[in-house]
Amino acid sequence: MSVTSATGPELLDTGLDARIAEQEAVFLRRQPRSAELVARARRSLAGGATSNWQIAQPQAVWLTHGAGSKIYDVDGTEYVDLHGGYGVSLVGHAHPAIVRAVGERVARGTHFAQPTEDAVVVAEELARRFGLPLWRFGNSGTEATMDAVHLMRAATGRDLVIKVEGCYHGHHDSVEVSILPEADEAGPADRPIAVPGNTGIPQAVVDLVAVVGFNDAAAVARVLDENPGRVAGMIVEPVMMNAGIIPPDAGYLEAVRELLHAHGALLAFDEVKTGLTVSPGGATATLGVTPDIICLAKALGGGLPVSAIGGTAEVMGLIADGTYEQVGTFNGNPLSMAAARATLLEALTPEAYAHVERLRGRMHEQVSRVLADHDLPWHVVTIGAKGCVSFLDRPVRHLRDFHDVDERLGHLHWLVQHNGGVFLPPWGKVEQWLLSVQHQEEDADRFVANVATFAGLVKG
Ligand SMILES: Cc1ncc(COP(=O)(O)O)c(C=O)c1O
């Protein structure tokens, strides 16, 4: 993990709102066909999009196709794709190995609700990479973390789950708590209040979630002490990636694992974003802390919907003996399994990871230099294929630091990148870039040039 800070004395320009208005006007002028589709879609798709998080501001961007490191919108504009479909497209677009594997599988039937051999190959490879012996599949990150929470409760016979403030684990009830709570509703930092992260979440479920700050092992110890025999386990993103990128302090993950195990509770890593993207064996391998349960999704399917849950023989034995029914019509879907096999064995090779690592280093160094040249006191945080600029003059250690980031900066950065031919995830402050194995130096350089434009605008 690499974190560097640009130093400089100057304060930010206060004309940010005006810069944003200008860039939004450019954005809208470039996308008349998307505007037409949004208007049409509003009549049949709720909100005019297929997920609320696809509605970028000022307008959702509609796409036609992708190839290699590029994606193309309905107005014919090409972008370097650093959005990566919210962390999925580590293999890039239309990767030849995925095209071949999926094409062959489509021609032989795509669904039986019976296992195919690819599922064993994928499970064996995940066991090798992540160091946990037994695996099951699902279709989304939400399903993986839902199974993880269920398994922790099933294994311990307890109901309370510890969750970190600011971690996003998908949209099931037990984890839609304290995702990005407002500062004035979240309570004290060392004793956060559990805040529903959506409407439709029963308070009775919220009451079964104990919220702690990231990098605060003492808070985990307190919850365990105050609730003897009640805590099933803790779910955490080992590197937080839904509040920029927040690395764990040295020793934090080891400490919480030890505390949980001392109290008969389990540890689940949500590696839906970090798994495969930060290294072949995810944050688990990079940080050297193996939890009881690992959740994967996103990049695993090479662009097809697939998730996985891995665990120790003891935990996954509950599935094997039928104590916990891990089920789903599409689990182990042959098309998804064929794509996952090609992703792991043909696309995400050691050479491909080395290539991504070179690009990471190039972007990290060049973006840091641009910030320093503009005397902007922000941080560049990169790990594997992931990276972000943290618009704060100090390293972010938990959500309370992250609250201090001016979200207008993330939005302006997103707009400038977009208007300059680079597609980042729309929620500029929260999200991070994703490189793929098909990106090249010129893709990275286009991004860096746009950072320079953005820095110039901010400095006025
Ligand atoms: C860390 C993490 N876990 C779980 C999820 C949920 O995954 P999905 O959207 O596939 O349900 C996400 C989605 O962004 C995520 O970032």
Image: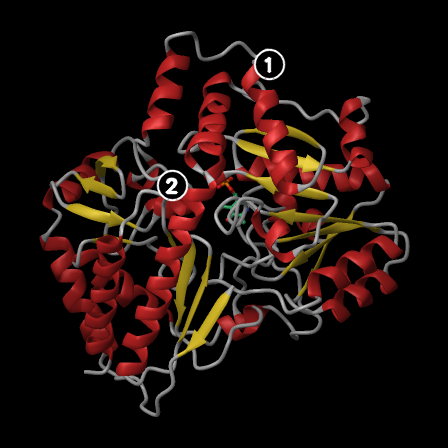
Where does label 2 land, which residue? 89
Residue at the outermost front position: 351
Residue drawn at x 46%, y 38% is 349
Density class for disc 1 (Cα within 10 Å; few <14, some 14-19, many ≥20) is some
* Residue 92: image location, x then y, percent: 33, 40
Q: Are marks 1 and 2 in contact (CB under 8 Å)?
A: no
* Residue 377: image location, x then y, percent: 38, 82
Q: Earlier in the sequence, mark 1 or mark 2?
A: 2
- Judging from the image, what secondary structure is the residue with disc 2 in? loop
Left or right: 49, with 144 as reference point: left
* Residue 68: image location, x then y, percent: 27, 39
Q: Is residue 186 visible?
A: yes
Tell me: residue 371, above or below residue 351.
below
Tell me: residue 270, above or below residue 19.
above
Q: Amino acid at mark 2?
A: Ser
Residue at the outermost top position: 108
Q: Quadrant of residue 85?
A: top left
Q: Amino acid at mark 1?
A: Pro
- Judging from the image, what secondary structure is the residue with disc 1 in? loop
Decide which of 57, 76 is in the foreground and name it.
76
Distance, label 1 to label 2, CA atoms, is 25 Å
Where does label 1 land, which residue? 115
- Mark 2 close to ligand 1, CB under 8 Å: no
